[in-house]
Image (cartoon, rainbow, N blue to C red):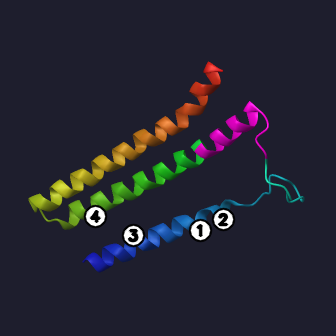
Amino acid sequence: MTKILKTLVVSIALGTLVMPVAFAQTNPYGNVVPTQVPTLNSPGDVMNLLYTFLGWAFAFFFVIAVFMFLWAAFIYLTGAGNEEKVSEAKKRLLYGVIAIVVALLAGSIPSIVKNLL
């Protein structure tokens, strides 16, 4: 059973890694590829870097939460009433909720910082 679970988790993870390639339809720089590394010369550049990082963190933690919910559901359904499996599923569900809270915090930090500055 664990081999099936590992195969399922690996296939979902690999499928998620392919998604950015599918959505990478446009180049934000047009037809020009930047030749220099962006520099941080002003506070606005630092804020843009922070917004970009927190946007990625927001998406990453939501993906982790979905994996945790799916994993918890799988453990719960295959546990067949076993108390140990049910408690493990509850822990996974709690981890998924924590991932959503962290994602929401990561998504709200840019607006909080923007209002403060």
Which corner quadrant of the image does residue 81 belong to? bottom left
Instruction: Identify the residue under disc 3.
Output: 9
- Tags 3 and 2 touching, CB below 8 Å: no
Mark 1: amino acid: Val
Q: Residues within 10 Å of mark 2 (few under 14, many from 20)?
A: few
Q: Which mark is residue 18?
A: 1
Instruction: Identify the residue under disc 2.
Output: 22
Residue 95 in the figure: left or right of residue 61: left
Distance between the alpha carbons at the discs numbered 2 and 4: 28 Å
Q: Determine the residue positioned at 70% across, 37% down.
A: 46
Mark 1: which secondary structure? helix
Q: Determine the residue positioned at 60% across, 28% down.
A: 111
Query: Can residue 42 be found in the magenta stretch?
Result: yes
Distance between the alpha carbons at the discs numbered 3 and 2: 20 Å
The location of residue 22, given as percent across then percent down, is 66, 65
Q: Give the range drawn in magenta.
A: 39-53
Quarter the C terminus occupies: top right
Q: Which of marks 3 and 1 is nearer the N terminus?
A: 3
The location of residue 51, given as percent across then percent down, is 64, 39
Relative to 47, residue 100 above or below: below
The location of residue 41, given as percent across then percent down, is 79, 37
Mark 3: amino acid: Val
